[in-house]
Amino acid sequence: MLLALLLAPFLLLLLYFIVRPKPVTIPIKNRHVFITGGSSGIGLALAHKAVSEGARVSILARSLPKLEEAQKSIRLAHGVDVAIFAADVRDYDAVQRAVNDAGPIDVLVVNQGVFVPQALEKQGLDEIKFMIDVNLMGSFHVIKAALPSMKSRKDRRQPASIALVSSQAGQVGIYGYSAYSASKFGLRGLAEALQQEVISDNIYISLIFPPDTETPAFEEERKIRPELTDIITSSGGLLKADEVASKTLDGIKAGNFSIPLNLEGRMLTIATAGVSPQSSFLMAFLEVALASLARIVSLFFLWSAYRSVAKWHFQKKGA
Ligand SMILES: *[C@@H]1O[C@H](CO)[C@@H](O)[C@H](O)[C@H]1NC(C)=O
């Protein structure tokens, strides 16, 4: 104990020098923020927030009527127009056209996502492919289309950002989420690798891990998810889209790589820190100090999840 206390200052000092990428702040005001999945839910809330902070905002989504509705709601709330682009992220040519028309992007928020929870055995391949194509391949499409103009932006001394909206299901696998989790875990690999590729262009990656959020899509999803999924995830709270949006934007501006949104999320992010970039030496210190505690908490979580699975199967057999 005493030894640990004596070592703490040295560890802090060491971490202060070695954490990477180095801390930055990413300005939003007067910059071009491009948000996919921007016509509803978290994306729309983010668009409102970015507009209110003085950004020039573009939103992309599949449905033109929904985009127009979103545009109207932002005009009513802030007296400002956002640019709208109707495109399916699965269609690379359409995404590229939209990104070209929108002009150079400073902050790219890759937020589109679809979610159909189901046990793998019961889930259709079409649904699995839908999630992988929209959530994972769609993110590649958006980033690949935007990257050239982001890299050649005029003021490269101003840091730029690519933010990917993952999910707590991108940190832990849950019953009924195999395809969704695969797509969201995939974003983490993409983000960690991409950060090394774009750091010399002064571009910073953020990875957001929202818990269940009150959105139109979540309401639909909740109706169909397996009973066991409900049982296992019942401890997680439900956040409001506005809350998610404002914490997300703050995290992006702080240049944070991992952006958890509530206490449970912060614990999960410490437990799954792995080899993720970390700019904050204080946070790095916490990750080091709490690593074994976080592992124990994770093991207890798993114990409880597996107990629910066993109990549920036992009751089903009994009935
Ligand atoms: C960004 O990261 C720092 C260090 O981990 C943390 O203190 C801060 O709360 C984070 N900001 C946001 C908005 O997430």
Image (cartoon, rainbow, N blue to C red):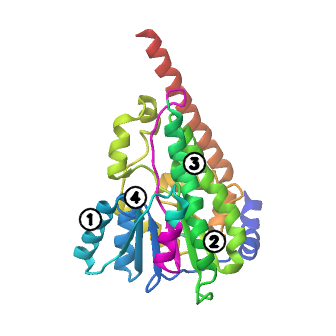
**Quadrant in which the N terminus is drawn:** bottom right
Q: From mark 2 to mark 3, how far is it between C-alphas? A: 27 Å
Residue shown at 39%/48% (left/top)?
A: 237
The circle on residue 55 is none
Mark 3 vs mark 4, foreground winner is: 4
Residue 86 x, y percent position in the rendering: 40, 64
* Label 2 CB sits under 8 Å from any ligand 1 atom: yes
Mark 2 vs mark 3, foreground winner is: 3
Residue 152 x, y percent position in the rendering: 63, 83
Q: From mark 2 to mark 4, how far is it between C-alphas? A: 37 Å
What amino acid does circle 1 point to? Glu
Pick out the residue farthest to the top: 318
Q: Which residue is mark 3?
A: 183
In magenta stretch: residue 105: yes
Label 1 Cα neighbours within 10 Å, binned few <14 / some 14-19 / many ≥20:
few
Q: From mark 3 to mark 4, how far is it between C-alphas? A: 19 Å
Q: Which residue is mark 4?
A: 62
